[in-house]
Image: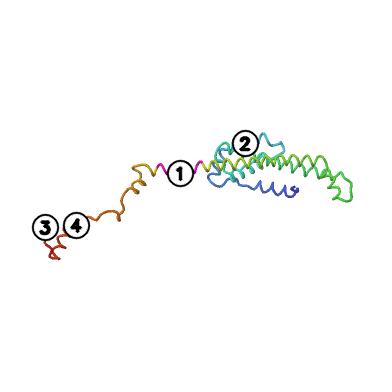
Amino acid sequence: MSTSAQILANTKNAALSTGPRTPEGKAASSRNALKFGLTSKQVLLPHEDPAEFEALEATLLEQIQPADDGERLLVNDIAVARWKIRRIELARAAWMEFDLSRRRMDDRNLATAWTLLSPEIQRFDKYAAAERRVVENAWRKLRVLQQDRRDREKAAAEAARATLQNKPNSPQTRANTQPSGADQEPTADPGRVVAHAAAADIPLIS
């Protein structure tokens, strides 16, 4: 489980994200702007910073490069679930700090143990585990979709190449059917034949 310091560091790193850098990433980000804009209004709580959510989604779009609506919906699921995990961890850390402040124990390790075993902390962990399963399932479905898309693109490219090669007037077909220099029979030059016969004193048959 992440500590408060780790959560704070992750938040700062997300805020430093500059978003997509490649042309493909920028195009995907543009297509998703409205979709994620609506999502952020539905997901964010009043005290949460939209810029941090936008940094998270920009990082995911740059990393995943969704190519169609199906892939974009799964990226949406991942972004929302990751944001909820962040929220749960922040709330869990705040609750632990509050609960520990109420426990008057000299042994702070024992006080921490009591807090970790509390029903509240266990519910936080349960909620976080559920959101992590959402992320894992979305990633698995996304990999299947992307592999299927790549296979279809590869098959389409191979079919187009085969069609081009089989066209009668295509450059490939002409190159394959045109005889090579080694296969062509040499053509006799009449002038050279006469000169050769005269030099060898061979009578020509007229």
- The residue singled out by tag 3 in the image is 205
User: How far apart, in angstroms, are the residues tagged by discs 3 and 1?
Assistant: 60 Å
Q: Residues within 10 Å of mark 2 (few under 14, many from 20)?
A: few
Where 197 falls versus 84 (above or below)?
A: below
| Secondary structure under the numbered disc 2 in the rendered image | helix
The reply to whether discs 2 and 1 touch (Cβ–Cβ < 8 Å) is: no
Mark 4 surroundings within 10 Å by alpha-carbon count, few (fewer than 14), some (14 through 19), many (20 or more): few
Q: Which of the marked residues, 2 or 1, is nearer the chain's N terminus?
A: 2
- Compared across the picture, whether 175 is left or right of 158 comes to left
Q: Nearer the viewer, residue 1 or 195?
A: 195
Whichever of labels 1 and 4 marks the residue nearer the N terminus, that label is: 1
Residue 37 circle label: 2
x, y percent for residue 132: 69, 42
Query: For the point 15% across and 65% down, which residue is it?
Result: 200
Q: Quadrant of the C terminus?
A: bottom left
Q: Label for residue 158?
A: 1
Residue at 44%, 42% (x, y): give it. 159
Q: Return the disc, 2 or 3, that comes first in the chain's sequence.
A: 2
Q: Is mark 1 in CB contact (under 8 Å) with mark 4? A: no
| First-in-chain label (3 vs 4) | 4
Queried whether the magenta region covers residue 159, the answer comes back as yes
The quarter holding residue 190 reads bottom left
According to the image, label 4 marks what residue? 189
Q: CA distance from mark 2 to mark 3?
A: 96 Å
Numbered range of the magenta stretch = 152-163
Disc 3 marks which amino acid? Ile
What SS does tag 1 mark? helix
Display coloring: rainbow
